[in-house]
Amino acid sequence: MTGNALRKNCLLLFFTMAVLIAGCETKRVYRPRPETKVSEKRISRMGYTIQVGAFSQAENAARLTEVLKDRGLEATYFVARAGLYKVRFGDFSSKSSARERAEYLRSTGVIDEYYIVSPEEYAIARKQKYGDMYVRDELVKTAGSFIGVPYLWGGSSPDAGFDCSGLAMTVYQLNGLSLPRSSKEQYDAGNPVERRLLLKGDLVFFSTSGGNKVSHVGIYMGEGRFVHAPGRGKKIRVDSMSRKYFSRRYVGGRSYL
């Protein structure tokens, strides 16, 4: 083989290797988490619920919520729009059973006019059509509507995480998912998510009472931020997971979709 031919072959080999090496380099791209497997935990969906009230003060909505709870009904209040609060309660398997209970409560003067919310009206019912991120965006939107609202839910001991978990429970129920009440139960009911893989709408849990015991929960908003209820008497707000206080007390994340 002549010198020129050898040089040509070497150049061709070098060019080929360069192309192969370049082809092996890939850009980092966002990849969504795998779809929920059948073996993973799932929480139940909400049935028919009863919606009542149109209060300008959160305190009045909270008062009706407590009255309904005293009657053995699962109730919560929420922000219908800026400056307007409503109450939802119950989880009925049929519209007729929801109407029967509502009519009884109206006849006894506990409630006035009411509206029955059907399962197909929830965001989770539209997941198949619009996708997982649609539901997640709705969860974050719902959580965001509570920012700045005084936290007035009642509850058991702080160790049970009842106060903060009331917000998480309400956000999920308003979107059609029946989340347990306490933060510990919510933690146990979800599917574990690595911190770097958290998505909007996941719940993030903290141990604020020492050790690794779950005692606080927030709704993840993306970009390291979460919405939570700091405690009774304080307003619902957004905090960063990178804050030293929360970073040191972080226990883990959970997904329910």
Image: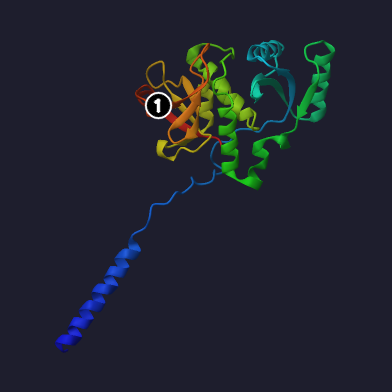
Report the side of 29 relative to 122 (left or right): left
Q: Quadrant of the C terminus?
A: top right
Image location (x, y in percent) of residue 41: 55, 36
Crowding at label 1, few (<14), some or many (≥20) Cα neighbours within 10 Å? Answer: many
Q: Give how far across and how far down residue 9 sits, in percent.
A: 22, 81
Q: Nearer the viewer, residue 91 or 116?
A: 116
Q: Quadrant of the N terminus?
A: bottom left
Q: Residue at x 72, y 35 (%)?
A: 121
Farthest-out residue, front:
83
Q: Amino acid at mark 1?
A: Tyr
Relative to 228, residue 177 above or below? below
Residue matched to label 1: 250
Q: Quadrant of residue 174?
A: top right
> Which of the pair 188/60 is nearer the observer?
60
- Tell me the colour scheme of the image: rainbow
Question: Residue drawn 60% across and 35% down?
Answer: 138
Give residue 246's position: percent from left, percent from top. Answer: 39, 24
Q: Residue at x 67, y 10 (%)?
A: 63
User: Is residue 67 rendered to the left or right of residue 19?
Assistant: right
Residue 154, picture quadrant:
top right
Residue 144 placement, left or right of 215? right
Q: Residue 22, image x and y in percent?
A: 32, 64
Residue most extreme to the left: 3
* The one of 52 and 217 positioned closer to us in this rendering: 52
The residue lying toward the viewer, choosing from 59 and 184, is 59
As displayed, is residue 243 above or below residue 69?
below
Number of numbered discs? 1
Residue at image coords 67%, 42%:
126
Query: What kind of element bears circle 1?
Result: strand
